[in-house]
Amino acid sequence: MAERTNTKEDIKLTRGHLKIFFGYAVGVGKTYSMLQAAHAAKKRGVDVVVGYTEVHSRPDTEKLIDGLEVLDVKKIEYGNTTFDEFDLDAALKRKPELILVDELAHMNIPGSRHLKRYQDIREMLKAGIDVYTTVNVQHIESLNDLVTSVTGVVVEERIPDHIFDDADQVELVDIEPKELIERLEAGKIFNKSQTQQALDHFFNIHNLVALREIALRRCADRINKISEIVKRDSTQDYYTGEHILVCISSSPTNAKIIRTAARMASAFKGKMTALYIETPETSLMSIEDKKQLRANMQLATSLGAKIETVYGDDVAFQISEFARLSTVSRIVVGRSHSKKKYFFSKPSLVEQLTNYAPNLDIYIIPVKGVSKYQERKINNKENINFLDLLKSIMLLVLSTLVGYVFYMLGFSEANIITVYILGVLLIAVVTTQRIYSIVSSIVSVLVFNFFFTVPRYTFNAYDPGYPVTFLIMFIAAFITSSLASKIKQNAKHSSQTAYRTKILLDTNQLLQKEKDKQGIITVTCHQLVKLLDKDIVFYLVENDNLLEPIVFEAETEGPCEDYLSESEQAVAVWVYRNNKHAGMTTSTFDNAKCLYLAVRMNETVYGVVGIHLLEPLDAFENSVVLSIFGEAALALENEKAIREKSEADVIAKNEQLRANLLRSISHDLRTPLTSISGNAGILLNNEETLNKEKRQRLYSDIYDDSLWLINLVENLLSVTRIEDKTMQLNMSAELIDEVINEALSHINRKSNEHIITFKQDGEFLMAKMEARLIVQVIINLVDNAIKYTPSGSKISIHTYKFHDSVVVDIADNGPGIPAEMKSRIFEMFYTASNQKIADSRRSLGLGLALCKSIINAHGGEIEILDNQPKGALFRFTLPIEEVLIHE
């Protein structure tokens, strides 16, 4: 049975519904309202369960829990403390119609399946469970900076905007700020020790009014988005054309820029792209900067941005070119507060962008802390590579020796300076870090001064022009080495890009050649190993389950037992069931050894791939990996379609065979059966009145009809066994003349009305066959000749040897077979009717088709020819079996 592909409509019908009780501050009554709604749902007959609530010792709220089923919390030990957490597995096992889970933005304790509670809720929604939950305005990601600027408090627990926007229902729980402060002062929100502190800081009237306004505006924005979606779906030409580009960096302040761009994209109802410019210095980035860069990329993704990466040392030019080619309408960048230097300072990024893209709207977001971050980055220390140090010293020594030879030969100082510049250039090429070429530029000037200027072997210089010479020499060496380093970095990056692109192209070409699942899996995983040089684990989906993992090992990796454990396989199963990424470098099962990704086409998952990673993939690698997965999924989808089409063709063929068989049987069996029953009835009722001659004729007719039926049944059984490939051939060496004589003894009685002759060339002809089936072939061919030739016709059988085959010719001198029928004569259910032959109606068209199937199963051939001077000749061949004579 073909697998059923879930459509988006099916998923919407089976997916649970999310309702968010939304407020602007703690204490407005979100949990209270949620519990009231739960009681109302229970009265309607809904199966309601409380999964997790935070009542904060509020009596009125605690009373509302009474009468509702409450799940036990999950105890998780972290450090020296035991924490209570929502038990996701217990909720999925219980699977109520509606579950209440407080604090949507809560961050789970390490060791939980997911990093954030909203991910727990998303999994329950996919399982078909409706969820009620709560959240405050300060927990929405894009509003974080805005709330921080109002309250001065940085909120760490946040949810992506799309979680809020995609909720099926949002209920704003709102009270006046003054009433909220009164509740706080009455001790209904916090205990007395916390109340005064809250009033002095967060819960002042200014903050609460501002937060309430933000919450109201956010609810209005959500309604506007829903309206725009409806408008877009109902109007085919609806398109705003706005494309916001935000630049990503490893700066901690970049998060504010991303959130601002997200709010802008939302306001303009456009799409957002987050662009990262990879420069030669990217490889020297510290671990902290890499983590921050990944965090900023994840933030941009959570806010709906598409991540793109380009390479180049001119950041402003790369941004402007990407914006031009991608039809970007607005660019969002950050502004540094660092002071501009007046000497040797290049224009700022904003100034360069303005020059490169004067027609684009550029939005500059002021941020703090950039200068401090830049200094930390510049002060990154590089480890000393002793091999590079040795190469630099040797090249400087070699340059000095060559310079000394030039000096002895009387060459000018300009030639010697050129030798040192060449030496510095070579150092920049053969070393891995730029510092060696910079230091070599300085050292080369000093060495030249020491060995080749007067007075020699000192660092003094009498000629007043020497300082200028030294400066020019240093600048030339420095520029040359810098350009060489950049060219080497660009060449290295271009080589990596070309290699990755080639792997992607090769994957596409190799997958097109594969026709089965195993070949597709092997190609995909081998290409991933080549790309990443990491072990790959593949789980194939079969009958809605994952099969045993197939491991493809990289040469540089060690033993792989640790990521074939039950816990690792459990992560792969979760990825298959939820169609999400999980494992290493993600926020779900982040303690796993591998990163697990689904090989999917739309909502259909064909397999799960585990990649053994020690650190996250970079943006370009991730893009190539996802492209390979897409190619693999498409190949598996095509393989599935071809397989299903083949199965459908077989079913259709069998159905057609059954229909033809039933139609032919119902038509052609009626005559002999009617004849048998009629003749038998005459004999039973009139036996005494019939003379001997009439009785004998009736007996003969019954006998002939019964033989015809027996032969028909034999043909039907043989055709069935051959078509479903259940017939087993027991081949042995047989004398062909004995087989023919056996067949002639079973020819029907009407053979007496024809002249049948048999001739064999040679004394012994043995063929490899199953005698029973070849007897049936000869019977069918001779019966066919008897049936389609008039009485008195001659039928001859001739056997002879031809090369490595025994040839059997069965010929008649009847009317023959027209040329247009010869191409179809061996087709099943095809009959060549001839009005001159009385019994031509008695044929299902199985005899000749069966002959062809039997002869082909023996490795022989059968054909129809014209007999000379007239008639038809059927010729078939069988493999010859040589007779061994032992002396």
Image (cartoon, rainbow, N blue to C red):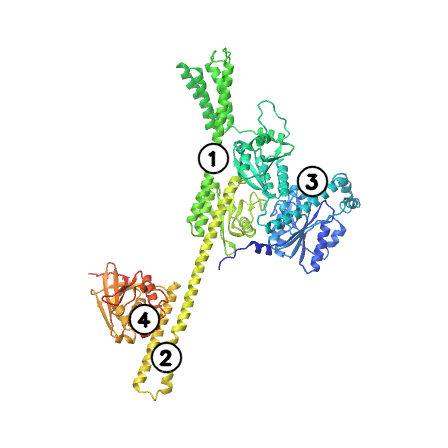
Dot 4 falls on a residue whose secondary structure is: loop
Q: Residue furthest bottom?
A: 689
Estimate how packed mark 1 is, as few (under 14), some (14 to 19) or many (20 or more) residues with alpha carbons within 10 Å. Answer: few
Dot 3 falls on a residue whose secondary structure is: helix
Q: Residue 676 carries which label?
A: 2
**Which residue appears at 47% of the width and 54% of the height?**
640
Mark closest to the chain's N terminus, 2 or 3:
3
Observer-side mark, 4 or 3, equals 4
Mark closest to the chain's N terminus, 4 or 3:
3
What residue did someone put label 4 on? 834
Observer-side mark, 4 or 2, equals 4
- 687, above or below 530, in the image: below
Residue 759 at x, y percent in the picture = 22, 68
Q: Which mark is residue 147?
A: 3
Residue 137 at x, y percent in the picture = 69, 44
Nearest to the observer: residue 96 or residue 75: 96
Mark closest to the chain's N terminus, 1 or 2:
1
- Give the Cα distance between marks 4 and 3: 95 Å
Which kind of residue does numbered mark 4 sit on?
Asn
Which kind of residue does numbered mark 1 sit on?
Ser
**Which residue appears at 64% of the width and 39% of the height?**
260
What residue did someone put label 1 on? 494
- 444, above or below 883, in the image: above
State which quarter of the image contains the C terminus: bottom left
Which kind of residue does numbered mark 3 sit on?
Val
Side of 192 relative to 853 (left or right):
right
